[in-house]
Image (cartoon, grey):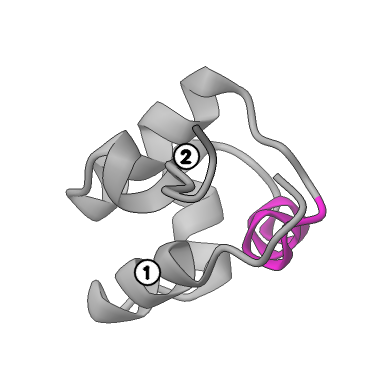
């Protein structure tokens, strides 16, 4: 990953969820959510899917870097 995941943070805020709220929903620590948003942690596919379901977004919406080909 390597870059900040602004889209994840925006989607979380739009759902009115804190990092802690989202972490509890998907079963990880708040620190994990924070690190994903900072681009310092590369989540597993199953965690990505859980986050997408919690935020009503697709994998493309939150995790696809359009600059990569």
Q: Which one is closest to the eye, mark 2 or mark 1?
A: 1
At numbered mark 2, what does the secondary structure look like: helix, strand or loop? Answer: helix
Q: Which residues are magenta?
A: 30-40
Q: Which residue is mark 2?
A: 26
At numbered mark 1, what does the secondary structure look like: helix, strand or loop? Answer: helix
Predominant secondary structure in magenta? helix
For label 2, the crowd category at 10 Å Cα-Cα, with few meaning under 14, some 14 to 19 and many 20 or more, is: some
Judge left or right: residue 5 versus residue 54.
Answer: right
Provide residue 64's location: percent of width, then percent of height.
43, 42
Indicate whether residue 28 is drawn in magenta. Answer: no
Q: Is residue 23 above or below residue 37?
A: above
Q: Is residue 15 above or below residue 41?
A: below
Q: Which residue is mark 1?
A: 12
Residue, x 77% and y 59% (percent of image)?
Answer: 31
Residue, x 50% and y 72% (percent of image)?
Answer: 6
**Figure quadrant of residue 10:** bottom left
Residue, x 67% and y 54% (percent of image)?
Answer: 36
Q: Quadrant of the N terminus?
A: top right
Provide residue 13's location: percent of width, then percent of height.
35, 80
């Amino acid at each position: 990953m390597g870059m900040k995941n602004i889209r994840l943070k925006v989607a979380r805020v739009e759902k009115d969820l804190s990092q802690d709220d989202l972490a509890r929903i998907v079963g990880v620590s708040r620190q994990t959510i924070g690190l994903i948003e900072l681009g310092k942690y590369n989540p597993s596919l199953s965690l990505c899917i859980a986050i997408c379901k919690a935020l009503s977004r697709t994998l493309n919406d939150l995790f696809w870097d359009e600059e990569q080909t």
